Image (tube, rainbow, N blue to C red):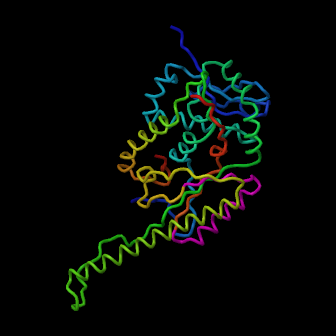
Amino acid sequence: MAVKSGVWLHAVTRDADPCGLDGLTGIGGCAVRTVQAGGLVAVVSSVDLAQFGEEPLRRNLEDLDWLETVARAHHTVVEAVGRSRPVVPARLTTVYRDDAGLRAMLEQRRGDFDAVLDRVSGRTEWGVKMYAAPTASASEPSGTSSSGTVRPGTAYLQRRRAQLSAEDQRWQLAVAGAEEVHAALTGCAAAARRHPPQDRRLTGRTEPMLLNGAYLVELRDSGRFGDAVTAQAARHPGLHLELTGPWPPYSFVTIEEEPPR
Amino acid sequence: MTLGNTPANGTVAMPERVALVDLLDRLLATGVVITGEVTLSIADVDLVYISLRALIASAGTVAAHPPTSEDRTQ
């Protein structure tokens, strides 16, 4: 039986010149190719539908190693395409049955793509994650240093109450600080959005994530944005800031879905 | 808790390698979604749910091998 193949969409751009894509490998280690229509250029990988059809995809997405390999391969292509030109990355696992289907979509959504390409042109994405800074105060209060005027048990409870109240206050300050940082960074960006805070099991940190922000910044302002992040970190010693990027403008290329599904 | 490259408070951490979890934030929850007859793209909610389940299942592995500055991707 012949292997049925599909077309994995990596990214859409306007640049008809596919230079810089030579030797670039996509999903499955094969060279990427381009499909053109409507003045747009789609960069794609041919994929085996035995692995990338709807049913096998569902199964494979449960496999973290598989998911990571595919996500990193996709990201490598999107990054390479976007290095020297505006790019609209496709969401992971956008697979077409054939080039004709992809071409029809490009023709049909040309206006949407043009609008998004204009929006991200000359801009790049930065990520800033914020946590409450770890402190050494999380230990149990000792119950042994009673002055003698109150019973040890009462003293313990008083200390414990004061400790919990201090922790609560610290938490509220951290949350407010993260909001301030987000507002300040949004002021340095062309656009900003929040991703859901990452699960503590995934961050590997004891402190919960307060904010998972993405900022679309003019390329020429990248240095200034980095300075702003550093300045905010200095202003908020109760927060721990982590800067990631530059990213392709993943968080800023949403095109309305076509109802009905 | 091992936080090999955690700087002092008031400074900014900049991981060298792209963390998978940051990448999936961007590749699954955002981006162009083009649905229709020609695509096989899985419904967003399903996709995010499936992937998060896979990620969280892997968190046990992370706990067993504390992340270092070289490998903080899972």
Q: Which residue shows up at 71% across the image and 32% down it?
A: A21
Q: Is residue A168 magenta?
A: no
In this picture, is A24 found above or below A190?
above
Residue A132 location (% of width, % of height): 48, 65
In this picture, is B48 found above or below A202?
above
In this picture, is A35 found above or below B12?
above
- The image quarter in which residue A97 lies: top right
In this picture, is A224 found above or below A7?
below
Question: Would you say A110 lies left or right of B56 here?
Answer: right
Residue B50 location (% of width, % of height): 44, 36
In the picture, the quarter occupied by the C terminus of chain A is top right
Q: Is residue A232 magenta?
A: yes
Which SS type dominates the magenta stretch?
Answer: helix
Q: Nearer the viewer, residue A71 or A173?
A: A173
Q: What span is in magenta? A: A212-238
- The image quarter in which residue A13 lies: top right
Residue A170 location (% of width, % of height): 45, 72
Q: Residue furthest front?
A: A260
Residue A87 location (% of width, % of height): 71, 39
